[in-house]
Amino acid sequence: MIIRRAQPFDLPGIDRLLSQVLEVHHEGRPDLFKTGVRKYTDEELLGILADAERPIFVAVEEQALPGDILGYVFCIHQHHPNDNILTPIHTLYIDDLCVDESARGKHVGTRLYEHVLAFARDHEYYNVTLNVWACNDEALKFYEHLGLRPQKIGMELVLQ
């Protein structure tokens, strides 16, 4: 398995996995998440691919065809200089991590996460953060297994 920066020819695979992620969220919270759509359009994805502050890494087999990816991880550089309350640390935020349904259990997610940690260390980030929806028990267990701990907790009261 190889982990590398995503390229425009990876869009079909990224699109496929974005749909898988959305369906997991829709099943868990149909009141919040639509079905049959994606988080980003291809035009938006091309913009993200060109943005050095938002690296996307993909896991592929060594002889993979273009667009045939096992998983991805979207990252975003976060920094709050001159903020009234936050220190000016550099955070690498994991915006989205997905392993293809057919590749789960093969440590693809772990390898992607380890790649992100190495990237963050190489670029002298202070920390790596992410959000996980409470309805996604498998993701929560996965992240806890990797050693992540809650930094903050979002709460809600549904009124309707």
Image (cartoon, rainbow, N blue to C red):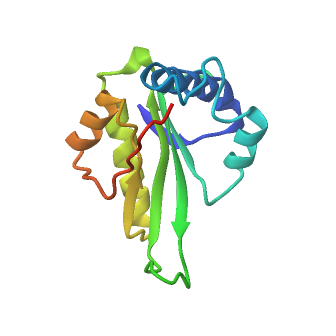
Residue 99 vs residue 79, the one in the foreground: 79
Above or below, 88 relative to 137: below
Q: Position of residue 53 (x, y in %)?
A: 61, 60
Q: Position of residue 33 (x, y in %)?
A: 56, 28
The residue depicted at 64 percent of the width and 17 percent of the height is 36
The residue depicted at 46 percent of the width and 19 percent of the height is 27
Q: How many marks?
A: 0
Q: Is residue 15 left or right of residue 63?
A: right
Q: Is residue 60 visible?
A: no
User: For residue 12, what is the image quadrant?
Assistant: top right
Above or below, 2 relative to 121: above
The quadrant of the rendering that contains the N terminus is: top left
Q: Residue furthest right?
A: 43
Q: Is residue 116 left or right of residue 36?
A: left
Q: Position of residue 47 (x, y in %)?
A: 74, 47
Q: Residue furthest top?
A: 102
Q: Is residue 67 left or right of residue 100?
A: right
User: For residue 157, what is the image quadrant?
Assistant: top left
Residue 30 vs residue 131, the one in the foreground: 30
Residue 69 vs residue 134, the one in the foreground: 134
Q: Is residue 62 left or right of residue 15?
A: left
Above or below, 114 relative to 7: below
